[in-house]
Image: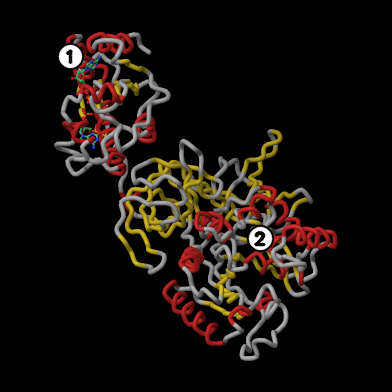
Amino acid sequence: MNDMNSDAQAQVAAYLQQHETKSLLRFITCGSVDDGKSTLIGRLLHDTRLLLDDQVAALEADSRRHGTQGGDIDFALLVDGLAAEREQGITIDVAYRFFGTDKRKFIVADCPGHEQYTRNMATGASTADLAVVLVDARKGLLTQTRRHSYIVSLLGIRHVLVAVNKMDLVGYDRAVFDDIVAGYRELAATLGIPHVTCIPLSALKGDNMLERSPATPWYGGETLLEHLENVQVDRDTRDPGFRMPVQWVCRPDLDFRGFSGTVVAGAIAPGAEIAVLPSGQRSRVARIVTADGDLAHAGVGQAITLTLADEIDASRGDVIAAASSPPEVADQFAAHLLWLGEQQLLPGRPYWLKIGARTVGATITEIKHKVDVNTQEELAAKSLELNEVAQVNLYLDQPVPFEAYAENRALGAFILIDRQSNATVAAGTLDFALRRAGNIHWQHVDVDKAARARIKHQQPRCLWFTGLSGSGKSTIANLVEKKLLAMGQHTYLLDGDNVRHGLNRDLGFTDEDRVENIRRVAEVAKLMVDAGLIVLVSFISPFRAERRMAREMFADGEFLEVFVDTPLAVAEERDVKGLYAKARAGEISNFTGIDSPYERPEHAEVVLDTTASRPDELASTLVRHLNSGV
Ligand SMILES: Nc1ncnc2c1ncn2[C@@H]1O[C@H](COP(=O)(O)OS(=O)(=O)O)[C@@H](OP(=O)(O)O)[C@H]1O
Ligand SMILES: Nc1ncnc2c1ncn2[C@@H]1O[C@H](COP(=O)(O)OP(=O)(O)O)[C@@H](O)[C@H]1O
């Protein structure tokens, strides 16, 4: 969620510098496609007269060409920048805009209202102090209003301004406004949003935007701009102490080693005692270096380079923190997730997790429940679909310094990234560490894999057979094991059908169960390889992600993916167990190749074409491959 691109970051920095002395309000706008959000921002920008003259001229020309407001200026065009978006009539990305008045400066993240663009909203919301939630007076509170408000509360925004827009279209009817206010206050109470202000307005006509409107004499509150200028946001009340995630280690020559990053909490001065996490090494700050010379102190939002009194190892992603109050370090968490992937979330599947400047491997170990964003009801779930929100348990492959999101957004927000496509598939917030991690330690054992392998006179391996049902995995694996046994080798064959009778008898054939099936058998295979055996695993293992997970559990060269390549038509023709016929007849569902996918391997070490050679020949090919020491 801290994913502002560097262009945007540079713009923000330049803007902040310009208006350094004024207080800053960061806010987001959320609303449905037609609520008039773009018009509202456009008018704010225009009426605060900070638009450049040539921008106004261009806008007037554009309004005549594309506008929907007759000859008048179409303020939405100011915001809906791109032609493609105009054609769709929706804004599709977060746009950061800057404006100011005599009293305050503002950064507004304009978040699109379309269903599938919740991700952008989460991006904008993660740095905002206040959310402007637009409600169309004619429509009242919509599913979208509830969803956005839920995300607003999830991301820790404590101030909501409910802009009840298009009051002109309901005759400035006070009863309509009061109804919406009552409904929203109820919603805010269930979500725990403490500060709610509701304003009746017409962004198009300008009512209650900058000046009190004569059309709403019954409304005695602030105008939109007054509220934005005056609201006191209660951010930064808790100071957890100094924190700076290391963005990069600056080492121009042997004499200088600096750690660069942006201060996300607290303040720092030369001489201050710091700890580097996760290692926990301590030192003192020697200098605070910037492009404009050394500083005597630095605070939140400043980009600095620290040099330390001692030679200490810190790398990108580490956190430098006040030694007296360092953040916790953990590898298991309770967290909230907003799922943004087109493909569903599957517990047990490995993802990348990016927190601050650090990227580590992560799996969701359990979905505690998902949340119906309309009712806040907690529902049981085995997987998550696009835009669903859930409370989950999370396991990382290495400990990271963190803080609960509620305490410190910078060290408590993360994103999940798909390992194959590198797409962002979730935005999340850390709630707390699960203590288990600290209490379970690796037990040291003296007899190791090498020793066990030595007395068996063999190199332990995992031969991972993958392919459709009926492709020939079991037949070939069985022959290979016999050949190895005859050569005096110590083996074990783990076959899907057999393991599913015991260890995995609780699992079926849904995607999530198959992920868990493969995770468990990969763990068992790993133990057996550790015991010094040559393990043959014969499972359909239809997904690339889990085969890759299995591969990554083994040392280099230990894992061999063996693709038993048989076209679906051939496997179906064989139909050894009569299962294809049943699947075609609709008696079995989720059958691989029929109504459940099989993702062909792309980098298998060995490919066995069962339409070209007999089982025995294929088994010999594989044994030869093994013995060739590849
Ligand atoms: N719906 C469905 N889809 C696929 N396979 C099914 C299904 N239902 C039962 N079977 C039988 O289960 C065997 C596959 O189990 P696996 O553990 O290898 O499957 S998976 O790796 O979890 O996908 C598979 O065995 P093989 O034919 O040896 O592959 C089938 O006999
Ligand atoms: N070249 C071949 N390699 C492997 N199996 C073959 C081949 N040609 C025919 N078959 C037949 O295909 C069937 C494969 O079944 P099986 O080994 O149980 O597959 P899987 O374990 O992949 O489900 C067996 O009946 C086997 O005799």
Q: Could you tell which of marks 2 and 1 lies nearer the N-terminus?
A: 2
Q: Nearer the viewer, residue 432 or 497?
A: 497
Task: Give the residue drawn at x 76%, y 61%.
Answer: 63
Q: Is residue 332 above or below residue 36?
A: above
Q: Is residue 372 left or right of residue 587?
A: right
Q: Which residue is mark 2?
A: 299
Task: Give the residue drawn at x 56%, y 42%.
Answer: 314
Neighbourhood count class around disc 1 (C-alpha, 10 Å): few under 14, some 14–19, many 20 upward: some
Q: Quadrant of residue 335?
A: bottom left
Q: Is residue 496 above or below residue 629?
A: below
Q: Which residue is mark 1?
A: 482
Q: Are marks 2 and 1 in contact (CB under 8 Å)?
A: no
Q: Is residue 333 left or right of residue 1?
A: left
Q: Is residue 379 above or below residue 177?
A: above
Q: Residue furthest front?
A: 70
Task: Give the residue drawn at x 54%, y 58%.
Answer: 114
Give the amino acid at mark 1.
Lys
- The percent coordinates of residue 180 (x first, y second) are 51, 79
Mark 2 C-beta closer than 8 Å to ligand 1: no
Label 1 residue SS:
helix
Q: Which quarter shows the C terminus?
A: top left
Q: Is residue 576 left or right of residue 259?
A: left
- The percent coordinates of residue 543 (x first, y second) are 35, 34
Neighbourhood count class around disc 2 (C-alpha, 10 Å): few under 14, some 14–19, many 20 upward: some
